[in-house]
Image: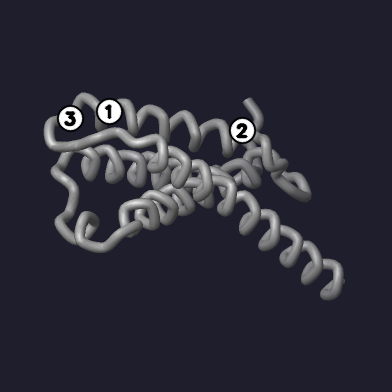
Amino acid sequence: MAKSNKNHKPTILISLLIIGWVAALLIESSQPPLQILSEIKGLDKVAHFLAFTVLGLLVCTLSFKLNPKPAIQIFSMPLLIVTLFGILEESYQMLTPGRASELMDLLADIGGALFAIIVANSVARLIQAIKRISS
């Protein structure tokens, strides 16, 4: 059996980071919301946006690693994955005592995923431009 020259360590590391982040989000969803989130108007939506931007960036990074291409389309597998997890998390919150599910939270989650795709594409274009200049 031929030995593969590909180094799978980065792919495994990114996958583990995604699993860890998803686990952290689910653990956080199992707790009563932090007091500060209800004290500052809109902070809850910002928290959702940022948490799902991080998840989106991790999923985009894995996507680039598994299927190198110049850009990720806006309507793509990373968006689908992050959106489905947002739906799962909001559904889970409906079943968790002391938590509530809100459509605006899901929209903030999707907004974070879209923002992550835009940022990932911008960084990918920048890296490509630097490679062209240095070649």
Give the residue drawn at x 38%, y 49%. Answer: 48
Query: Which disc, if any, is residue 77?
Result: 2
Q: Position of residue 5 (x, y in %)?
A: 65, 43
Query: Which disc, if any, is residue 124?
Result: none
Query: Label 2 vs label 1: CA separation?
Result: 22 Å
- Which label sits in the foreground, 2 or 1? 1
Is 47 on the left or on the right of 58, as rendered? left
Give the residue drawn at x 39%, y 51%. Answer: 51
Q: State the SS at label 3.
A: loop
Is 69 on the left or on the right of 59, as rendered? right
- Which label sits in the foreground, 2 or 3? 3
- How many other residues sit within 10 Å of disc 2, few (<14), some (14-19) or many (≥20)? some
Seen in the picture, residue 30 relative to 116 is either above or below; the reply is above
Q: Which residue is mark 1?
A: 92
Circles 1 and 3, Cβ within 8 Å, touching? The answer is yes
Q: Amino acid at mark 3?
A: Thr
Q: Amino acid at mark 2?
A: Met
Q: Earlier in the sequence, mark 2 or mark 3?
A: 2
Q: Position of residue 109 (x, y in %)?
A: 45, 44
Task: Confirm whether residue 13 shows in the render.
Answer: no
Query: Which disc, if any, is residue 96?
Result: 3
Toward the viewer: 72 or 8? Answer: 72
Quarter containing the C terminus: bottom right
Q: Amino acid at mark 1?
A: Tyr
Query: Label 2 vs label 3: CA separation?
Result: 28 Å
Q: Earlier in the sequence, mark 2 or mark 1?
A: 2
Toward the viewer: 125 or 31? Answer: 31
